[in-house]
């Protein structure tokens, strides 16, 4: 069997490779425009600029802040772990690091004087290439020093404060992924980006008993604090098997997919700091790779969107015209515009939505197209068999990726469990196009308790 299989693979491989190239070309024509890098290094050498790009692809800023001064809390089951100052400061940062020191920190989780906790994704960075580490080193030497320690630092209780315990943990959990065989060069680049630089699995792969990544359930979706990072394997029913490569690229570059998906919370940060800056080639490589990983079916079914059931936007002109919006909302609250069967008092499902949600998301769920409130029509997060993600965002809100981004307040203090359940059902049926939804107050209570 084996030799035959290898022979067949050898025959088929060139065909597959050609198909991939042809695909890439047709995809490239319709890509949304790329945002150019705002941060090239001040020194502007080729090597340091390349390092600035590698830092984007590895999303160092999401955890170490935009000026790399650190102090960001990474929530873990054992408590908050705070990122450190990695500017060129010799006292507070990594100004004294040699290139070998940086390589050890990134690949092995070993700082010059201590073991690093895996809240820093070294189990993924483990596979970083020498060339990328050299470029990162050149770049970080040009990052302006911030001469102070982060306001918050990590204090874990005994015995978790014994950093050398990580040595044993590393034996089981590093590296966090395995390379697949038989990939085309483009898919290999995609694998390197997804697994090593972008460390997508730190959020999308479930954890094993020791909190390392569970390789058998690679990228099949995992709870993430108040959010849920969905299954991104190519399974049709529970993953993103129905997405085209262009869909994946558009989502990673723009943070949304019309009437299908939205990148909120932690994913908004990944898009804002990292994926939207990637080159066409790198996004194409990741999309190609995400199509060839094993499809894993989970119990969290995605109910396919039924476009015919979705509401159409009521007006395109309601963008920044606040008076028109206010008028509109007032009218909408008294006239049943969306579903004539719903009685429109303020404690009816529709009344609750209009009172608490419509000012941002619009009466029709389409938000105001130009303001950065999410359009929620058709989103995957409201079409899941498990309503946990939707309940989570209603209960706890969302802070937006940047300080300037609009925020969503959490409603767990203002609304009862029954009211949150009622709004969830309204949103799932009206904007998700589901035939029915029966989220109960008890379910809301459970999700809030789990995520608190
Ligand atoms: C998911 C969050 C996260 C990302 C992404 C991340 N880091 Fe970290 N990093 C941390 C945390 C948390 C610590 C502190 C860990 C500890 O205290 O043990 C840390 C520590 C470090 C250290 C050790 C500093 C010291 O001596 O204390 C270095 C060096 C470092 N990071 C560099 C980087 C670089 C370079 C990148 C991008 C390639 C990066 N980090 C991306 C979270 C992150
Ligand atoms: C910091 C955690 C984090 C990282 C890193 C991350 N994601 Fe996500 N991702 C999420 C969360 C949370 C969501 C759900 C967002 C929402 O519903 O608003 C998500 C959603 C998605 C979706 C949409 C799925 C759907 O069914 O709607 C795709 C596709 C995706 N991520 C791909 C990726 C890829 C590819 C990477 C690596 C480049 C990545 N993610 C890195 C947390 C993360
Ligand atoms: C003050 C404005 C505001 C209000 C009020 C508000 N939201 Fe949001 N909502 C937002 C913003 C902003 C986002 C995008 C958050 C992000 O990018 O992380 C969002 C995101 C969402 C999402 C997308 C979640 C995902 O998949 O990422 C849903 C669903 C949602 N809101 C539902 C609601 C519901 C239901 C209500 C009423 C109970 C509500 N929102 C009230 C501003 C608001």
Image (cartoon, rainbow, N blue to C red):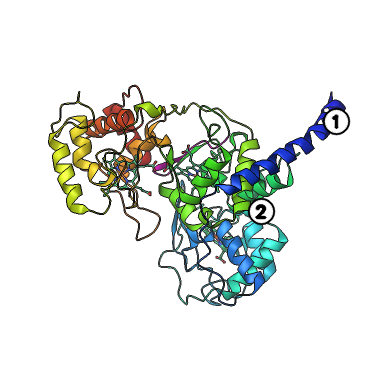
Residue at 68% over, 69% down: 99
How many residues crowd around disc 1 within 10 Å: few (fewer than 14), some, or many (20 or more)? few
Q: Which mark is residue 126?
A: 2
Q: Which mark is residue 7?
A: 1
Answer with left or right where residue 127 lies relative to residue 314. right
Locate the C terminus by quadrant.
top left
Q: Nearer the viewer, residue 336 or 303?
A: 336
First to last magenta residue range: 225-233
Q: Main secondary structure of the magenta part?
A: loop
Where on the picture, by quarter, is residue 98? bottom right
Residue 428 vs 63, above or below: the answer is above
Answer with left or right where residue 350 lies relative to residue 450. left
Residue 266 vs 6, above or below: the answer is below
User: Element type at marker 1?
Assistant: helix
Tell me which numbered mark, 1 or 2, is placed earlier along the sequence.
Answer: 1
Where on the picture, by quarter, is residue 46? bottom right
Is residue 26 visible in the rendered image? The answer is yes
Residue at 28% over, 51% down: 319
């Amino acid at each position: 069997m084996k030799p035959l299989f290898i022979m067949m693979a050898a025959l088929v491989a060139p065909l597959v490779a050609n198909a991939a190239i042809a695909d890439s070309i047709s995809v490239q024509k319709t890509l949304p425009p790329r945002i150019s890098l705002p941060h090239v290094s001040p020194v502007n050498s080729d090597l340091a600029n390349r390092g600035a790009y590698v830092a984007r692809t590895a999303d160092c800023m999401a955890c170490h802040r935009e000026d790399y001064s650190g102090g960001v809390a990474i929530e873990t089951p054992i408590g908050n772990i705070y990122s450190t100052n990695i500017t060129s400061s010799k006292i507070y940062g990594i100004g004294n690091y040699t290139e070998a020191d940086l390589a050890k920190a990134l690949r092995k989780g070993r700082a010059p004087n201590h073991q690093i906790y895996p809240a820093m994704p070294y189990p993924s960075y483990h596979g970083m290439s020498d060339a990328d580490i050299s470029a990162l080193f050149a770049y970080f030497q040009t990052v302006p020093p911030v001469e102070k320690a982060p306001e918050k630092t990590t204090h874990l209780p005994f015995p978790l404060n014994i950093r050398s315990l990580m040595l044993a943990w590393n034996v089981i959990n590093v590296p966090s992924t395995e390379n697949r065989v038989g990939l085309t060069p483009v898919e290999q680049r995609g694998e390197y980006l997804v697994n090593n630089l972008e460390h997508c699995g730190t959020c999308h792969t479930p954890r094993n008993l020791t909190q390392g990544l569970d390789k058998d359930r690679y990228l099949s979706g995992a709870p993430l604090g108040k959010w849920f990072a969905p299954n991104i394997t190519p399974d049709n029913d529970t993953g993103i098997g129905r997405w085209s490569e262009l869909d994946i690229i558009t989502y990673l570059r723009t943070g949304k997919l019309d009437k299908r998906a939205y990148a909120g919370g932690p994913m908004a940060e990944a898009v804002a700091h990292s994926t939207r800056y990637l080159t066409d080639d790198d996004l194409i490589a990741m999309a190609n790779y995400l199509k060839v990983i094993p499809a894993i079916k989970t119990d969290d079914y995605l109910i396919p969107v039924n476009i015919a059931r979705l509401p159409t936007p009521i007006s395109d002109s309601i963008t920044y015209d606040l008076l028109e919006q206010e008028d509109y909302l007032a009218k909408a609250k008294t006239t049943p515009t969306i579903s004539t069967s719903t009685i429109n008092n303020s404690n009816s499902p529709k009344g609750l939505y209009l009172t608490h949600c419509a000012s941002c998301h619009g009466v029709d769920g389409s938000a105001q197209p130009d303001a950065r409130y999410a359009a929620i029509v058709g989103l995957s997060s409201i079409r899941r068999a498990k309503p946990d993600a939707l309940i989570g965002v209603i209960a706890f809100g969302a802070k937006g990726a940047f300080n300037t981004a609009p925020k969503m307040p959490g409603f767990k203090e203002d609304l009862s469990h029954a009211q949150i359940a009622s709004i969830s059902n309204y949103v799932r049926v009206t904007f998700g196009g589901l035939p029915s939804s029966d989220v109960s107050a008890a379910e809301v209570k459970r999700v809030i308790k789990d995520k608190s």
